[in-house]
Amino acid sequence: MTADHLLPANATPLERALSLATNSLSRLTLPADAIRQFKTDPSDPLLPWLIWEYGLGELLPYLPEPRRAIAEGILWQRLRGTPAALATALSWIGMRATVEQEPPGVRFAEFQLDPGEVLDNDTAIANLIAIARLSAPARSRLSRIYHGHDLRRVLLDESRLGEALLSDHSGVFWRDGQTKLSFGRGHQWVNPPPDIVLAPAREAVRFVVARLIDRTLLDFSSLVNQATRSTRRSCTRTCSRSLMRWACLIHWGCAPSGGFAGRWWCSRTARPWATSTPTCRALSGGRRARR
């Protein structure tokens, strides 16, 4: 028989009784084994204290079950600050989202989310924003949630004016004043009955637009090539002189023969331009016409 004490064989009964009364191992054997397992298999009264110890109270609105909150919350904390943590947290509310990070620049710390559907419920929007803020790094900020209607800000030499906005991305601010919402739906017209034939009311006409680039056009001109005022004035002055010269020639009856490539003649005297009357030569400024 194994002795319950370490006293020698000649110990008195009083010494043995005192040894058994002061022996704590017999009372703490089972509780000591339970201490090693109280976090892996905790009792119900211990769950609130474990949630407080791990700092998982902010997850209870999305994980109301305490045991699940402890099991999945610890794994989520190890991934916190990464896209994997956001994907894990979104699975708690039955959602998925595409994360789009801003390129290097002034807004490098911002990111956007596309949930893949239009969120009609304010609760769903609030939960998505809250979970994104909990899962994102401390330096990052959720700037926008979009789906169906996505217009970006203008980038010089990259964006078209008809496909971007000058001020900022499309959307309106949420109640917090920090996150934008940009949602849109596409509606399809009802198909007409098969016995109804739709005919176009207008006929398409092809046309070509010829532009005179005498000024800067936002949707056509390059920012580095701007027409100056002196260029426009010189162009106008040259065109005006040419028109006035032709008007004087027609008025005095002097016109070129043989087209623009032929020799110049005076219709009044039927002589070459160089030997015509002084009046006709004066109109040309004393210059000989060249072939």
Image (cartoon, helix red, strand yellow):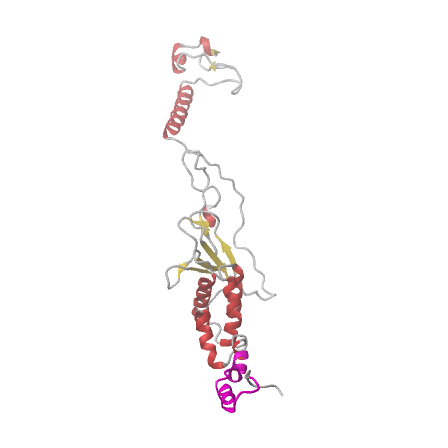
Membership of 27 in magenta stretch: yes
Q: Nearer the viewer, residue 270 or 289?
A: 289
Residue 146 appears in the rendering: yes
Residue at 47% x, 74% y: name it: 50
Q: Nearer the viewer, residue 119 or 70?
A: 70
Pinpoint residue 262: horizontal percent, then vertical percent: 53, 16
**Residue 176, quarter of the rendered image:** bottom left
Residue 21's place in the image compared with 167, above or below, is below
Residue 114's place in the image compared with 218, above or below, is below
Pinpoint residue 174: horizontal percent, then vertical percent: 39, 62
**Which portion, as a residue range, is magenta?**
8-33
Residue positioned most to the right:
1
Residue 117 appears in the rendering: no
Residue 278's place in the image compared with 24, above or below, is above
Residue positioned most to the top:
275
Q: Nearer the viewer, residue 253 or 121?
A: 121
Pinpoint residue 36: horizontal percent, then vertical percent: 54, 75
> Looking at the rendering, in which quadrant would you find the N terminus?
bottom right
Residue 29's place in the image compared with 86, above or below, is below
Residue positioned most to the front:
10
Residue at 55% x, 79% y: name it: 33
Membership of 225 in magenta stretch: no
Pinpoint residue 70: horizontal percent, then vertical percent: 50, 72
**Majority secondary structure of magenta residues:** helix
